[in-house]
Image (spheres, rainbow, N blue to C red):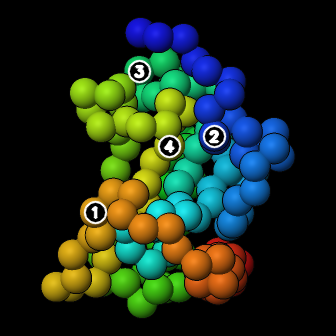
Amino acid sequence: MPAYDPQNPFAKILRGELPCYKVYEDAHTLAFLDIMPRSPGHTLVIPKAPVRNILDISPEDLVHVTRVAQKIAKASMTAFDADGITVQQFSEPAGGQVVFHLHVHVMPRHTGVALLPPASRKEDGKVLEASAAKLVAALK
């Protein structure tokens, strides 16, 4: 497996070199909105540990990511009046991974509404700010 690249966009977000619409942070994880959401409220949960994907994360760090993904999923149901949640994780190019820092997608869903195609459009910053505020409020 290729080595972890510390110049990937999520590593830069963790170091504060790139901005994000943060909705949750603790000692082990960071959760922020996807700027190219497939549904309103589409959130990414990442470990703070420098890991490429599920194949090289420690079991302990994976537990932290999974706990936060569940917390985000529950809050998303409320914040976005969702009917369900889609949770996805991709590992390595053949598995669909594009950014090589482990991340879990948490996407609120509504009955009869399809997900947008991946990376199909960049969302307006004001919409992302509003979504982040709704999710942060639901997490309290």
Residue at x 66% of width, y 84% of height: 126
Q: Nearer the viewer, residue 79 or 100?
A: 100
Residue at x 46% of width, y 86% of height: 80
Q: Is residue 17 above or below residue 132?
A: above
Quadrant containing the C terminus in the rendered view: bottom right
Q: Nearer the viewer, mark 1 or mark 4?
A: 1
Residue at x 47% of width, y 11% of height: 2
* Label located before the other in sequence (4 or 3): 3
Tell which residue pokes out farthest to the left in this image.
112
Residue at x 52% of width, y 25% of height: 52
Res. 68 in view: yes
Say left or right for 10 vs 66.
right
- Determine which residue is flagged by label 2: 9
Q: Is residue 87 above or below residue 10?
A: below
Q: x, y percentage for residue 90?
A: 35, 38
User: How many angstroms separate mark 1 from mark 2 (CA)?
Assistant: 21 Å
- Determine which residue is flagged by label 1: 117
Q: Nearer the viewer, mark 2 or mark 4?
A: 2
User: How many angstroms separate mark 1 from mark 4 (CA)?
Assistant: 18 Å
Instruction: Characterize the local packing of mark 1: few (<14), some (14-19) or many (20 or more) Cα atoms within 10 angstroms.
Output: few
User: How many angstroms separate mark 2 from mark 4 (CA)?
Assistant: 12 Å
* Label located before the other in sequence (3 or 2): 2
- Determine which residue is flagged by label 4: 103
Tell which residue pokes out farthest to the front in this image.
121
Q: Assign a secondary structure to mark 4.
A: loop
